[in-house]
Structures are given as C-alpha cells and as structure tokens.
Amino acid sequence: MELFKKTLDPVIALSAIAVLDIFLFLIVGAWTVGGGETMMTGLIAQFFLGDTLDRIPFWHEVFRPDASYWKIYISLGMLFGAIVGAIASKEFFWRFPRRISEWVMITIGGLLMGIGIRLAFVCNVSTFFGLTPELNLGGYLSISGILAGAWFGSLIYKRVLEGDL
Amino acid sequence: MSPTGQCLVAFVFGSVVGLLVQRSRFCNTAALRDAMLFRTFRNTKALLVAMMILTVGFTGFISVGAGNPMRFDVGINQVLGLFLFGVGMVLAGACTVSTWVKAGEGNFGAIWALIFTFVGMFLFSLLWSYIYWPPAPSAMTGEISLERLQLGFSNAQTLQEKTGIPAIFFGLIQTAVLYGLYRVIRRHELKQSITIGAA
C-alpha cells in the first residue's frame, strides 16, 4: 500500500486530522491529550496508592480517576495507530538514547511537560487544535507561553548540541 | 452519547491520528523548534493549515450553536504552564502527540518522556493540594479575578453573544491572519530556494 511505502506530506495529514477533529468537536469535544494523560496518571497512582490517593485533594477536586474518561482513549488510539503504521511500513525498531545528556534532557523535559500541562490545564494539542480555533482567550495566552518556552528551550538545546552544556 | 460510545469514537479518532502522524512525521515540537533554530518550516506550514481549517470549522459550527467548545477559566497559569511545557518539549524532543507516536515506533526515549510526564503531573497534583491554584473547575466563576490571576472565560461563543456578530466572522479574521503567516513562510522558502539555485 502506497501509504506505507513513502512519507506522507504533513500538510495533507494535518488537513485530514483537522477535518476529523471538527467531527470530534461536534460529537464529544476537540482533540486534546493532556486531560487523558492526567487521568492515566490518576489511575496509575490509584493502582499503586489505593485509598491513600483520596488524601490528595487534587484527585477528588480536579480530576477524580475514572477509566471511562473518553480523552484517555485518544492517547491509546494514537499509540495503536502509530504501532500499526510503524509495523506496516517496517519502521518499528527499538531505539534508545545513547548519551547521558539525552537521558537527562528527556527526563527534565518530561517532568516540565507534565507540570506545565497541569499548571495550564491545557497541552500543546488543545492550544493549537482546540482553544485557539475556538477563539478562546486561553489559546492566545497558551500560544504566547509555548512560543517563549520553545524559544528558551531551543537556546538550551542549541548549547547542548554545541557541547557547551 | 454513552461513555462507551465516547471512548470508542475517541479511540478511532486517536488511531487515525496516530497513523497519519506516524506516516507524515509531523511533530509539533519541530514545528516551533525548527522554525526558530533552523529556519525550516515543513511542520510549521502543516500546523498553520490545520489551524485555518479548524478555525473556520469550529467558529462556523459555534455560530449555529453546535459543537462542544472547551469551557474553563483562563489566566496567567496558561502562560506559565505552557512556557514550562515549551521548554520541556524541546528538551524531550517530543510533544504530547509525538511521545505517543514515537513510543509506538519503539523509541524508548519517548516512553521515558511519557513516564516522566506522568511523574510531573503527579508532582504538580501534590503541589496543587497545598496551594489550591489555579482554581479547581468547581471554583471557576467565568469572571475576571485579579487576586487569583484569572481572566475569566471568553471564546467565539461569548464574542457572538456580546457583539451580536456571528462567530464565523471573527473566525475568518483569524484565518486571514494565519494565512498571512503561511504566505510569509512560503515567500521565505521561495527566496531560500532561489538563493540555493543561484549558488
């Protein structure tokens, strides 16, 4: 199948995703990832901590762990779709970061993404594919934050690439 | 729609997105990082086109009272949170979408980033339980609250209600701005290719 033989133009791919996102918006709500990831965090924490989790107010006042939360399944679907695409195009293989600096950057980066999503109540997906197209004030605030953050992160990334850090 | 139906729709949507992103190598991080660092815009153009389609689609449906727009108060926490997120995604080399997609390709770095995203979320849940900020959904009022650094809630729907002008009108203005950005990038690329051709 042609789709699995060569790389798809991202403009075509994102246009198709945008049309599907409009349907999703009509049925349940716009595409988002951060909310589903937060719910997964709550479910994982509940698995390990049990009733102790109830003593943390966030998990009953902001996000009560619930496996039937639809946003979880967007992320699981993305993982499934990517596995199918990677296997069908023979692009699936295990890759590991090689340098210590990569492990450190990924660890810090992951932590900052998690903290940032929860502080903002939104992620990059809801910023660009939800809030801003809905003309929500939060979209413009988020875009200003993510642009400044990406610029600052790029400075650090550049210094790491150049071996200064 | 029943919760099971919602989950099924979400899974089908996510699966198609995962497949398309995997096949196109689209990355939101690259859309911002590459434009800033390397002046390449492959992903930025795709992001802008998607935003144009979505703006017309969302505001069009909001104009006739259809759709499910997100509804929560916003404030300084969006700027701070997405600033941290922006730094994090560049360092991790992946955003929320590409972590899942790269994980699906067997990239252990992406799986590691996902694990620490969850850890970061849990750490913030502990901090939130002490500071109770930003306000929980139950404490949101929709109004400006300077002491809580909140600017309330406004979107295409509230714009339409306040002005009496259909939301699509404002959507078309935003689309024109996004198209202007797209044209600037295309002109820049054309100039670049002419320079390379001449050399």
Image (spheres, coloured by chain):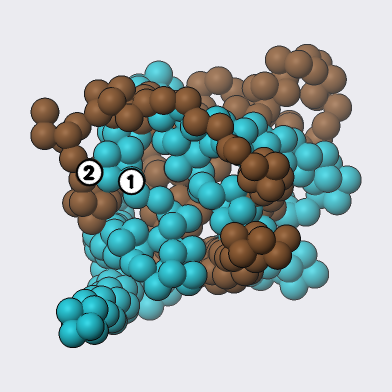
Chain colours: A brown, B cyan
In this rendering, would B139 be left or right of A129?
Answer: right
Q: Quadrant of the C terminus of chain A?
A: bottom right
Under mark 1, the amino acid is Arg
Lateral position of residue A54 relative to residue B172, left or right: right
- Residue shown at 45%/42% (left/top)? B98
**Residue most toward the right?**
B130
Q: Does label 1 lie on the same chain as label 2?
A: no
Residue farthest left in this picture: A2
Q: Pointer 1: what residue?
A: B25
SS category of the residue bearing label 1: loop
- Image vertical order of residue B75 relative to residue B169, above or below: above
Is label 2 in contact with label 1 (beta carbons under 8 Å)? yes
Q: Where does the image place residue A70, in percent across and percent down from the top left?
A: 46, 29
Relative to residue A47, is residue A33 depicted above or below?
Answer: below
* Chain at tag 2: A
From the top left corner, tell me how far across and down residue B162 is, in percent.
42, 74
Residue visible at 22% across and 43% down in the picture: A7
The residue drawn where x is 17% and y is 34% is A5
Q: Quadrant of residue B79?
A: bottom right
Residue A96 appears in which quarter of the rendering? top right
- The image quadrant of residue B13 is top left
Q: Quadrant of the N terminus of chain A?
A: top left
C-alpha separation, residue under disc 2 versus residue under disc 1: 7 Å
Q: Name the residue beneath numbered marker 2.
A: A7
Say which residue appears at 34% left-offset and 59% top-offset.
B43
Q: Chain of mark 1?
A: B
**Helix or strand or loop: what does disc 2 sit on?**
loop
* Residue A148 on image: x %, y %: 59, 71
Up-down relation of residue A141 to residue A70 (above or below): below
Q: Which mark is residue A147?
A: none
Q: Nearer the viewer, residue A119 or B20?
A: B20
Amino acid of disc 2 = Thr
